[in-house]
Image: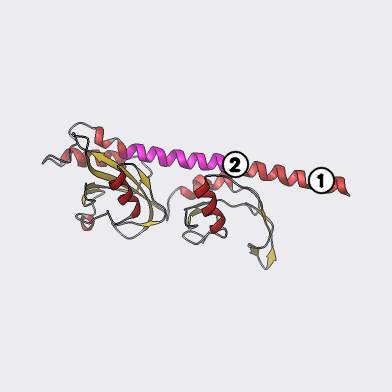
Amino acid sequence: SVSSLLAVDESIDRALGERRALAQVTAGQVDYIVRQGLKMLEEPAATEGFDLEDADPEPERRALRRALSGSIFTRVYLTDAEGEVLWTEPLYSSALGVNLGFSADAKATLESGRPSVSGLSTAVADGEPVVSVVAPVRGPSGRLAGMITGDIVLSGTHLGDMIRPAAVGRTGYAQIVDSYGTVLASTRPGELLEKSDHEGQVAALIKEKRTSSGTCHGCHETAGEEERQTE
């Protein structure tokens, strides 16, 4: 009957609204953790003795160790104004002297003097897939003197655990996706670093900074049977 159909539609709309609200809360938590990580990278430059323009590297190395401790980052790098790595924590000797200025996020920070966050990237230290957070470092004169970069390793991190509360129901799942549609974290095994099923739609939402909700009928199948999923 018409009344039954309206009741079903209202139930679906209510469920979609609840899922979207849960996704927004989860996204806010992830954003908060990334912002806290950025704050950890910005703090070293304000510590006593931190000066990339002098001949004593010890204050910078101590500050880098503090920035790494208790943060979401697996490793952190300190570079000069050209992007050349001066020190890493933990120490990766092979990364010393490597220029990070080639990456889009580092280049953006060096050119603008503002923090940046990458999409899918590759760690200079060992080639692992990472997301990098970059903070500018200014000297006593106020000029850009370098940058501090923190790597969030995508394999074996807590990113999947952070978004798990948003994956409700038998078929519900949650993902963190970059602006190119690459899955950076997922509650579905095997989808890490794959292209999202909705990469075009996700990219548009990220660019426009808006939210959306809807139902998906044909792009996910389990055991040969089509399943309806809420996204």
At which x and y percent is residue 103?
32, 55
The residue lying at 75 percent from left, 44 percent from top is 11
The span from disc 1 to disc 2 (Cα, nearest Å) is 24 Å
- Amino acid type at image mark 1: Leu
**CA neighbours of label 1 inside 10 A, class few (<14), some (14 to 19), many (20+):** few
Q: Can residue 106 be found in the magenta stretch?
A: no
Q: Is residue 46 left or right of residue 183?
A: left
Q: Secondary structure at mark 2?
A: helix
Q: Secondary structure at mark 1?
A: helix
**Magenta stretch: helix, strand or loop mostly:** helix
Residue 83, numbered label: none
Which residues fall within the magenta stretch?
23-41
Residue 13 x/y as whole percent: 71, 44
**Is residue 39 one of those drawn in magenta?**
yes
Give coordinates of residue 8: x percent, y percent.
Answer: 79, 47
Q: Which of the marked residues, 1 or 2, is nearer the chain's N terminus?
A: 1
Left or right, residue 1 beside residue 112: right
Label 1–label 2 contact, CB within 8 A: no
Instruction: From the viewer's side, name the closer residue of 58 and 41.
Output: 41
Amino acid carrying mark 2 in the image: Leu
Color style of the picture: secondary structure
Q: What numbered label is drawn on residue 22? A: 2
The residue sitting at 54% across, 53% down in the picture is 202
